[in-house]
Amino acid sequence: MLTKVHRRIIVNRLLQSIPVLILATFMVFTLMKLLPGDVAITLAGENATQERIEEIRALYGLDRPFFVQYLSWLGHAVTGDLSNSLLSGEAVLETVKRVFPNTLFIVLYAVVVSIVVGVPLGILAASRPRSRLDGFVMTLSSIGIALPNFWIAMIFVATFALNRMWFPATGFVSPLDNIWQAIWYSTLPALALASSGIAEVSRQLRSSLTEILSSQYVRTLHAKGLSPAVILWKHGLRNVSVNLLTVISLLINRTLAATVVVEVVFAIPGMGNSIVNAALQRDFPVVQGIVLVMVVTVILVNLVTDMLYSVLDPRISQK
């Protein structure tokens, strides 16, 4: 059951998200208009007459002023109507329903890998500061942050798909159809996305945990005779839980954004691949609809994070 504090957090976050949604969709709408080419010519065909091109513009409302087009789209979006694709005619909402679960599965897969691998590495590095193990973890995290996801994705395709043939190079299987096939097809994309996530989680956890373990509070616990394991697990990790939650929240948002290029490399029918194809073909409604869903997803992640803050540290909800 939601408490009064949780309800206040939800209302405040939703009110703050309104200008974010408007600004994000407006910026994308503007950038799409600045792209070279004319979508009316694409729809009518290169050999179409000027009269036919003007008919296409009038049919899809492309002849209306810019702000009128944007406000018309925004008004329909508020009611749940994301319009239809200019090229296929399919409802954008149906496109989102088809591709969003694929992207969500890969994002969650990558985030789980980042946490499962990154948290132990961060703990090991913090428990042995300035050791060879600490130096190895920090070097590994620096490399993971520096290398771009799409480059790692291409290396994985060349090495583990084309050369070794351990994993498929392209394609996707829905977890609703076959969960094990879905994991197999999604392993390389998830690992490519998780490379920077593992580095970020281990580095941030190591930094926060090292600061806690070197504090006067922990030295007092040592003096009282508590074992290092108890201090680490009961006191150290509890004190860095809020920072770790922040890192995971940001990681989910960054991973969602990074799927745009990784899905293209692996030819995954997800939101990233769809938005790239739609942008290249100047299919405004598809781009706008997918961007709106991605922004809403980020807002929901931040909302859940704010609520978890109040659970992990009740003092935060009192500020």
Image (spheres, grey):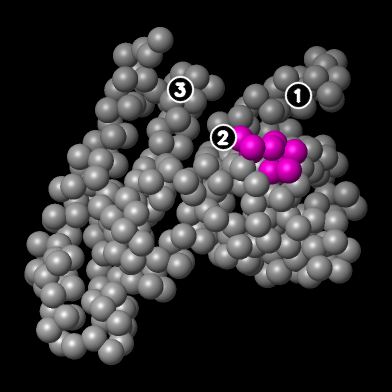
Q: Amino acid at mark 2?
A: Leu
Q: Nearer the viewer, mark 2 or mark 1?
A: 2
Q: Residue at x 38, y 73 (%)?
A: 281
Asked whether the residues under the numbered discs 2 and 1 touch, taking CB atoms below 8 Å apart as contact, a structural biologist would say no
Which element is circle 2 on? Answer: helix
**Which corner quadrant of the image does residue 312 belong to?**
top right
Which element is circle 1 on? Answer: helix
Q: Earlier in the sequence, mark 3 or mark 1?
A: 1
Q: Which residue is mark 2?
A: 245
Residue closer to the observer: 309 or 261: 261
Q: Amino acid at mark 3?
A: Ser
Q: Which residue is mark 3?
A: 310
Q: Which residue is mark 1?
A: 233
Q: Residue at x 19, y 54 (%)?
A: 73
Q: Is residue 126 left or right of residue 279?
A: right
Q: Is residue 288 above or below residue 131?
A: below
